[in-house]
Amino acid sequence: MDMAQGKVEICGVNTAKLPLLKAAEKEALFARIEDGDKDAREKYIEGNLRLVLSVIKRFSSSNENVDDLFQIGCIGLIKAIDNFDSSLNVKFSTYAVPMIIGEIRRYLRDNNSIRVSRSLKDTAYKAIYARDALTRKNLKEPSIEEIAAEVGISKEDIVYAMDAIQNPMSLYEPIYTDGGDTLYVMDQISDKKNKEETWVEHLSLSEAMKRLGPREYEIISLRFFSGKTQMEVADMIGISQAQVSRLEKNALKTMRAYLTA
């Protein structure tokens, strides 16, 4: 990164001269992109590079080169453009920011990953084999203690080995469907680290939440500001998790309609 006289260059791009696209310009360009216009795609990418810059600021504490993070962020941006459904009532930035963050996090994880040793893999595979055998034998999922006793390895070593070979799972991985309402991995977890951070700083969330009914307001507050899982919310307010899921989706739809109006 080169900084001189107010000019900032990342990957040879003068960030002070990056174009700013108005909403109408973005819509027109995206319509051309969907028709296969490559020039429109390039202009759309350039017009959203500031979005990549805003995201990589989140990783300022990283030891990685800023140019590298910018290039990886651009890959996320391009993926977002290529997969964005303009028929949905969602701002492109709302869709693209998590894509860009995800691409950078994958890069940081893969670039700094520790090679899993052969002995760890062997322990993990023995544990998996023992788990499957015990499940078939007892017709239920065995505990870590039972697996450890079967394999003859301490439960601490088994947990460590199993964790070392795990592949990351997408937050959008579907895990349950009931009458058309799909529950995803992200619905089952809480985010205690980032619950007080604002993902998309310039959205008028407080105003959008005023459009919600009392129960929907409570659910959104508990889910996204207190970091509760859907199951925890269901227990707290005395309804089923499926009802929480439906109310949450309706609330987010109402907020999205206001924020993208």
Image (spheres, rainbow, N blue to C red):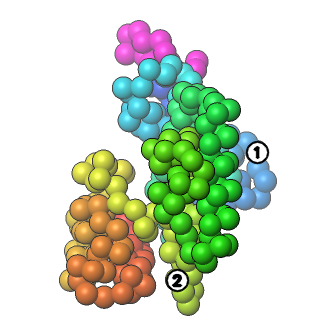
Which residue occupies 30% across, 73% down? 232
Quarter containing the C terminus: bottom left
Give the residue type at disc 1: Lys
Q: Quick check: marks 2 and 1 in contact, CB under 8 Å?
A: no
Mark sitting on residue 7? none
* Total numbered circles: 2
Membership of 238 in magenta stretch: no
Per the rendered image, the range of residues in magenta is 1-13
**Quadrant in the picture for residue 223:** bottom left
Q: Dot 2 lies on which element?
A: strand
Give the residue type at disc 2: Asp
**Residue that carries the numbered disc 2 in the rendered image:** 181
Q: Dot 1 lies on which element?
A: helix
Membership of 12 in magenta stretch: yes
Which residue occupies 51% across, 60% down? 146
Tell me residue 142's x, y (percent).
Answer: 53, 66
Residue lying farthest right?
Answer: 36
**Quadrant in the picture for residue 245:** bottom left
Tell me residue 130's x, y (percent).
Answer: 64, 58
Could you say which is closer to the camera, residue 86 or residue 39?
Answer: 86
**Quadrant in the picture for residue 116:** top right
Mark sitting on residue 38? 1
Q: Please rate how many residues cluster around mark 1, counting C-alpha atoms within 10 Å: few if below 14, some from 14 to 19, many from 20.
A: few
Please say whether residue 116 is visible from this viewpoint: yes
Could you say which is closer to the camera, residue 7 or residue 167?
Answer: 167
- Horizontal side of residue 78 vs 60, given as left or right: right
